[in-house]
Amino acid sequence: MEWLTIYIRDKNQIDHLIQIPNEASYSLMELLKASELPILGTCGGMALCASCHVYIHSNHILPEMKEAEEQLLDSLVNSETNSRLSCQLPVGDYLDQLIIEIADL
Ligand code: FES
């Protein structure tokens, strides 16, 4: 699969579709940012800033969280059980048809 479809759910619960290249060397954060979505990725993907925080609205099976991601999400006031740091999600087939919402900073 060369391209992955990602849905971005906005505050009005409307999904917007983007397509990103299936490039394993990138994280989801990097390709969302390249798609000009409001993802800052300030720390460059080090799990230090949370400016790539998203909520996962689909039932995808995602890679388990590492300790750094879990700790940072635990420290956020707007963290939910479906929160993930998009910089910690490597791009791959498993992301196709993912539905996310970008969290407020
Ligand atoms: S880019 Fe900083 S935590 Fe993800």
Image: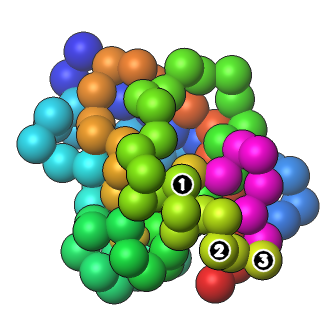
The answer, for residue 8, to whether it is visible in the render is no
* Numbered label attached to residue 70: 1
For the residues labelled 1 and 3, say whether their Cβ atoms are less than 8 Å apart: no
Q: Give me the residue at 78% from left, 71% from top.
A: 78
Quarter residue 48 falls in:
bottom left
Q: Is residue 46 above or below residue 70?
A: below
Q: Give me the residue at 76% from left, 46% from top.
A: 81
What range is drawn magenta here? 78-83
Asked whether mark 1 lies closer than 8 Å to ligand 1, one says: no
Amino acid at pointer 2:
Ser
Left or right position of 15 against 27: right
Amino acid at pointer 3:
Val
Q: Is residue 93 above or below residue 79?
A: above
82 falls in the magenta region: yes
User: In the orientation shown, which residue stands out farthest toward the right?
Assistant: 12
User: What residue is disc 3 on?
Assistant: 77
69 falls in the magenta region: no
User: What residue is disc 2 on?
Assistant: 75
